[in-house]
Image (cartoon, rainbow, N blue to C red):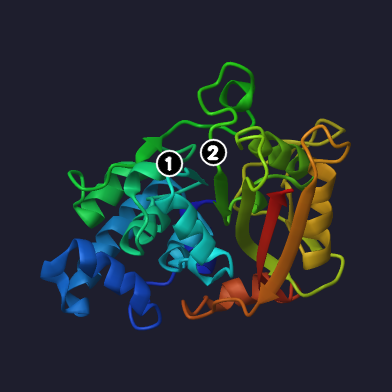
Amino acid sequence: MIDEATAKSKYWVEEPPIHAHPDAVSLIQHYRPELQDAEAMIPILKDIRLKAWKIKYYPCVGLWHFFKFGMTEMPIYPEIIERLKQGQRILDMGCFMGLDGRKLVVDGAPSEGITNMDLEDRWFPLSYDLFKDEDEFKGEFFGGCDINDEELFGEGSIHRHRYDMIYIGYFIHLFPPTRQSQIINNLVQLLKPVSGSMLFGNTAGTAKENGYKMKADFAPPIKNEKGEMERQDFVFHSTKTVVGLMAEAVRGGKDGEWDITADKAIFDTDTSPTKAFSLHFKDAEIVELNFCMKRK
């Protein structure tokens, strides 16, 4: 794993982007009405972010990317809210502190239909430190959940075929390109095998038609075919390659037929990435990538 000093040089912005993301500020104020002065929440945000950073030096933590609600900007967001109101269940896989789940509730969804899941369960107490909603939020939190582990998605798991919708925000890039198709298929096993069940999300992508590959400096080294330790490949998908990835994951028809779509938008740079960040990714032509696969 990258050391903290190097991670901070590339992936750390000191001040929270409270003026760039008023929806995130409003969400916190909904749960914390004593923080109506947005400036008053800055030391609280910085303290919680620092604790999260000490758990994992993730770029999305250091650069405040978790302050952006990727789900709300997708065209299917009204459908998600309506389906939750009808009693359906959504899984936020790789939920971090469960901010998207809290946003769903504020926008009208019942919290009982929201399941938050992450490999790292030390994020969860921080979420309650931020929102102070232990008595209000009735959603679920499951920690220690590895989507590589068949015990999570295989026969006999309580999660298999349980969810109507699964959201993966800034999640798929955490896995080597050679594993991503299998990861998508594992996630599909968590969906109810019925028409309309869907897997959707967003990630940092590229405007390059065939994607862009580089070495990941935030992931631990792995052994290559020669037995040597090396950095994992990191891929920025394009709309073309992410659709291809999802099609490959369900190829053969045993998991049904799917409608798969993807679109791109301007990447959020409101968090003022560091100069080192800009240099590191200067050739990637980064865009925001949204995708959805819905069972026919």
Mark 2 in CB contact with mark 1 (< 8 angstroms)? yes
Q: Nearer the viewer, residue 260 or 179?
A: 260
- How far apart are the alpha carbons under marks 2 and 1? 9 Å
Please, is residue 100 above or below residue 150 in the view? below
Identity of the residue drawn at 77% across and 42% down = 181
| Residue occupying the point 39% across, 77% down | 21
Relative side of 249 to 132, left or right: right
Q: Is residue 57 left or right of residue 172?
A: left
Q: Position of residue 38 (x, y in %)?
A: 22, 77
> What residue would you read off at disc 1?
115
Q: Residue at x 30, y 67 (%)?
A: 27
Report x, y in % for residue 56. 45, 48
Residue 292, visible in the rendered structure: yes
Q: Is residue 220 above or below residue 162?
A: below
Element marked by disc 2: loop
- The answer to whether residue 70 is visible is no
The crowd level at tag 2 (other Cα within 10 Å; few <14, some 14-19, many 20+) is: many
Q: Amino acid at mark 2?
A: Tyr
Q: Report which quarter residue 277 is drawn in.
A: bottom right
Q: Is residue 100 left or right of residue 176?
A: left
Mark 2 = which residue?
163
User: Front-most of 209 and 122?
Assistant: 209
Residue farthest left in this picture:
34
Residue located at (66% from left, 76% from top)? 279
